[in-house]
Amino acid sequence: MEQHNTATPNHVPSPDASPASPAIIPRAEHGVSRANISKSALKVLYRLREAGFRACLVGGGVRDLLLGREPKDFDVATDAHPEQVRQLFRNCRLIGRRFRLAHVQFGREIIEVATFRAPHEVLNGDDDEEFNGDALVEDGRIIRDNVYGTIEQDAWRRDFTINALYYDIEDFSVVDYAGGMADLKAGVLRLIGDPEVRFREDPVRMLRAVRFAGKLGFRLDTACEQAIPRMAGLLEEVAPARLFDEAIKLFHSGYGLQTFEMLRRHDLFRFLFPATEEALSHEEQGFPITFVANALKSTDARIQEGKGVNPAFLYAVMLWEPVRRLADRLMENGELPWLVALQQAGTAVLADQCAHIAIPKRISLPMREIWEMQPRLEQRRGARALRLMTHPRFRAAYDFYCLRAQSGEALEEGCDWWTRIQEVDEAEQRHMAGMDRPGGGGGGGRRKRRRRPRRSDGNPAEPQ
């Protein structure tokens, strides 16, 4: 028999509140089927249950199954402690300090197992630091969190109501403490507890709110929406290395364009890419700069088609406008060649950006290659042009070049030329590069780039 949750969608209690009776949705009344759950996840659930522990699927996997979507992964919550989980699975390793987790590995698939967590309690009376067992909170932010509790306590500790739904392997029911089922049906993304408190605990929750809303097509709850602009500055306190991964999640979800627009609308984007936000706030010849939007639209299409995407291309796109604008100023002031100006601008922009999002060398080096190949793509004569196509970064640089053309820079002729030369045979390639004519093989200089006085309606090339 279904029990009714006393927490209504319009009033979600604090995570520290006493848990209400959950709504129990029996198997016949929900759409989660074991046929759609990973066999590896089922093995973990069954073994935990057989060992006498409570075991539930939780989070995005349950949410996506209820929405009829294919989950990206499956997470398990249990009353077994991490060490107990490791004793049950030889293929298990424990990770994390802030959140102690068990990873059970089946080939390339990893099932993450977390122990139910309890609320934080103030024991020392200090204003800026709280400690309880193995939990540590500084200035409202959770630094370490390994205080274990019950499923009821764990539900109120989760961030959003739609992520606090549990699929119990014991009877195949869905357990709902926070009104997540009602919010799923209404298409509302709602934080559990006071949004300002939850955002202060972990400012990255603001980015997660925007990402989930964009991915699911949900609207933000009013309290959450109003709190984000007030709390956005807390992102400056998040470790830049952590924001590197978060940015990839934001823009490689298949809904990057919607996410980008929401980040700007809620005043979050400028704390991730301040130089890019400043550049995009300007217009050129009366038209907005559309390069980032066009690139994200193309990236979304690739992801939805199951094609690969490269984080280096994403970051090269995000920082191109600051690099281009600074390179133009360096050329005007110092009469530098464009390649040298790009190199100097790239170094300066990357140094500034890494104070906000730490970009590792494995990403920044390909980014610089993409930028620095742009002048070479404007030289379309001789053996150099043909050799350029053998460069490992050629395809990404070519896609980047064509996106520039379709976003307002007057490069259509060059984009068409590079597109065609990849489609013809070797003899025609030599002809196009002027290598079958007397004196052929010379390189052309860089012409002054100009902006087209119109917006492009074409579809951008697909980034690699």
Image (cartoon, rainbow, N blue to C red):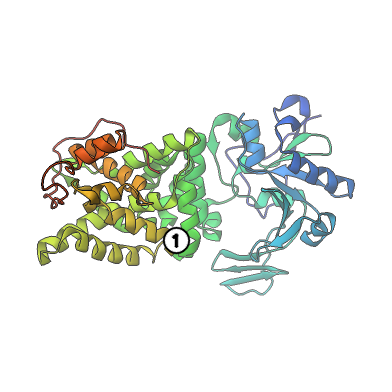
- Percent of width and height locating residue 42: 77, 40
| In this rendering, position of residue 454 left or right of residue 26 | left
Mark 1: give few (<14), some (14-19) or many (20+) Cα within 10 Å: few
Q: Is residue 368 visible?
A: yes
Q: Amino acid at mark 1?
A: Arg
Count of numbered badges drawn on the protein: 1
Q: In the shown orientation, is residue 62 left or right of residue 317?
A: right
Q: Nearer the viewer, residue 274 or 128?
A: 274
Q: Position of residue 396 (x, y in %)?
A: 36, 47
Q: Quadrant of the C terminus?
A: top left
Q: Secondary structure at mark 1?
A: helix
Percent x, y of residue 382:
19, 48
The picture places residue 270, in percent across and down from the top left corner, at: 35, 55
Is residue 212 positioned above or below 233 on the image? Answer: above
The vertical placement of 78 against 174, above or below, is below
Task: Give the farthest residue toward the top.
Answer: 28
Q: Position of 409 compared to 108: left or right?
A: left
Quarter holding residue 128? bottom right
| Rendering quarter of residue 101 | bottom right
Q: Quadrant of the N terminus?
A: top right
The residue carrying mark 1 is 362
Left or right of 380 in this view: 18: right
